[in-house]
Image: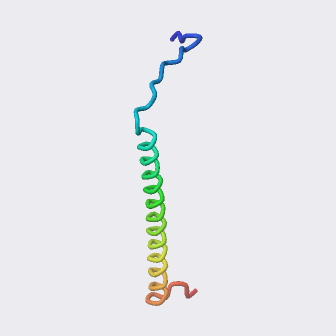
Amino acid sequence: MNLPDRVEPRHVEAPPDGYAEWFADVATRVRATQRRMARSSNRETIRLYWSIGRDVIDRRQRLGWGRG
């Protein structure tokens, strides 16, 4: 495949009016959603660990787990 030695830059049009504000709004919404997802994920992970801990404690008490 032969590639040109140099690629000519394309003409890029200026964004339409209001584009920068719209893009900033989208970026803000994406970041807010990412933060909510991270908090939700952390919350669910903590719930999982607590659930596992309760299971272990229950089995230790009920079934004698951990008594050598």
Would you place residue 7 above or below residue 12 in this image?
A: above
Q: In the depicted view, which residue is nearer to us: 63 or 45?
A: 45
Would you place residue 44 above or below residue 67 in this image?
A: above
* Residue 15 image position (x, y, % from top left): 43, 31
| Residue 5 quadrant | top right
**Render colour scheme:** rainbow
Residue under the image location 45 percent in, 87 percent down: 63
* Residue 14 image position (x, y, % from top left): 46, 28
Count the marks: how many?
Answer: 0
| Residue 36 quadrant | bottom left
* Residue 47 image position (x, y, % from top left): 44, 73
Q: Name the side, left or right, on which 34 lies relative to 67.
A: left
Would you place residue 8 above or below residue 46 in this image?
A: above
Q: Which residue is farthest front?
A: 17
Residue under the image location 44 percent in, 42 percent down: 23
* Residue 50 image position (x, y, % from top left): 47, 77
Would you place residue 44 above or below residue 18 in this image?
A: below
Q: Name the side, left or right, on which 6 lies relative to 32.
A: right
The quarter of the image holding the C terminus is: bottom right
Residue under the image location 55 percent in, 88 percent down: 67
Q: In the depicted view, which residue is nearer to us: 2 or 10?
A: 10
Q: In the depicted view, which residue is nearer to us: 68 or 5?
A: 5
